[in-house]
Amino acid sequence: MERSKEVVSDKWIKASVLAGLWAGIEIIAGSFLHNLRIPFSGTFLTLISIVLVIGFFQIWPKYGIVWRAGVITALMKSISPSAVILGPMIAIALEGFIMELAIRVAGRNITGYIGAGMLTMVGVLTHKVVRLFLLFGWDIFLIYEEMFIYATEKLGFIHVQPMRAVLSLFLVYAVLGALAAFVGYRLGQRAKNEQNKYTLSSEIHAKQWQQPSEDIEYSTRFLILLVVVLPLILFALSNVTLGVALILTLPWFIFIFWRYRFAMRQLKKWLFWMQLLVILVLAWFFSKTSGGGLEGRLIALSGGMIMVLRALVVVTGFAALSTELRAPLMQRLFFRSGFRQLYLSVNHAFGILPIVISSFTTPRQFIVNPARSIAISLRHVNSWHQHLLQSLDNKEFE
């Protein structure tokens, strides 16, 4: 009897196990932090991810697993109910590539793991800076600089330079990343010694990657239009007055709300509008032109309005792009044309996701003691791997 089994390399299978864990954390911890509006929740999630990945690598110290898991987890994020998924997807994939690169360069040792944690956290902070630039342009950094100078003068720290403060923040992030990597290393070593004591009786049922059921007719034409027009508008907003900016963005917003109004969930959040209001207030008080009387403040307010328009264009543009990239045609083109291993691995990761989530403690307990929750889950990775292999063997003769 001829076998019809679709071959998946062992690295991709193990990467799908890590991706299932990684995505489970994004679902459990991410949803909890998001609902509570906890500040720096993204930073906290990254620290947990570092602990998980470094701990996992102690059990299966093979090059190539980490970056694969990062890509799989990022793609699993594409079914998130959030309107804007490109930012988190890029961040997760970058985390995987940075940790993989650092470990390959420094080696499979404590130095390499700590270096991976440090570089990942620095990368996260860099991602935040780039995101601010994309949202508001270079003017937002000038406002922050004026705020910092004003605050240090009032507090008496006249000799503190803004650049030194920024470098100090990067140093703090690097130290946090090193600590997270060390915790992950210790948890992974402990789990490696204890995992053989634990077995998993739950059966894994592989399920296909389901498309979100959105009532929209996907269009490759509109996808190309978005890819071309979005950067052009952002470039133009950096070089025009407020009146021109309003005229330029009006057709954009009409088109977006006509076609993608269901994806504009971000615009329904009062916290998002509060952030834009804060930007306007900061521009009024701390822009370089705000010190020139009423006229200067009006110019500063005009610049703040352009930053708000830029932020709205970016948010709505990412929501639209995220929608079009979910088209079945795009999935087939991407996954089935030379990316079969990746396509199947995403399916396997979704297959073990329910069991992974059930192995976690409650969201509250996970946030209170994430290290313990990760340690418990790491003990089961070999069992999950074996179940995936068995499920593939069972399909072999179907």
Image (cartoon, grey):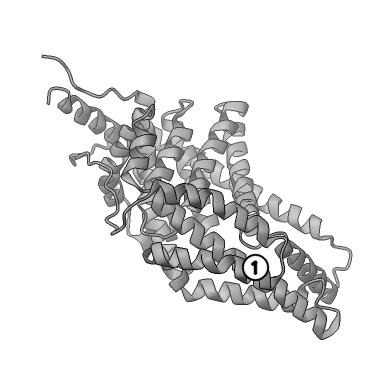
Residue highlighted by disc 1: 245
Give 114 or 271, whichever is nearer the viewer: 271
Is 308 left or right of 49, judged from the image as shown?
right
Image coords of residue 277 (percent x, y)? 60, 77
Image quarter (top left, top right, bottom left or bottom right) of the N terminus: top left
Question: At 43% across and 66% down in the image, what residue appears?
Answer: 264
Residue beneath the point at 72% across and 59% down: 138
What residue is drawn where x is 61% and y is 58%? 233
Question: Residue extending furthest right?
Answer: 159
Figure quadrant of residue 352 = top left
Residue 160 seen from this side: yes
Image coordinates of residue 95 in percent, x first then y, are: 53, 42
Q: Position of residue 236 (x, y in %)?
A: 67, 58
Q: Tell me if mark 1 has few (under 14), some (14-19) or many (20+) residues whose alpha carbon lies within 10 angstroms of its own.
A: some
Instruction: Find the residue positioned furthest to the top.
Output: 1
Query: Which picture quadrant has residue 287?
Result: bottom right
Q: Quadrant of residue 200?
A: top left
Q: Nearer the viewer, residue 159 or 241?
A: 241
- What type is the residue that disc 1 sits on? Ala
Direction bottom: furthest residue: 294
Q: Residue at x 38, y 30 (%)?
A: 339
Quadrant assignment for the C terminus: top left
Dot 1 falls on a residue whose secondary structure is helix
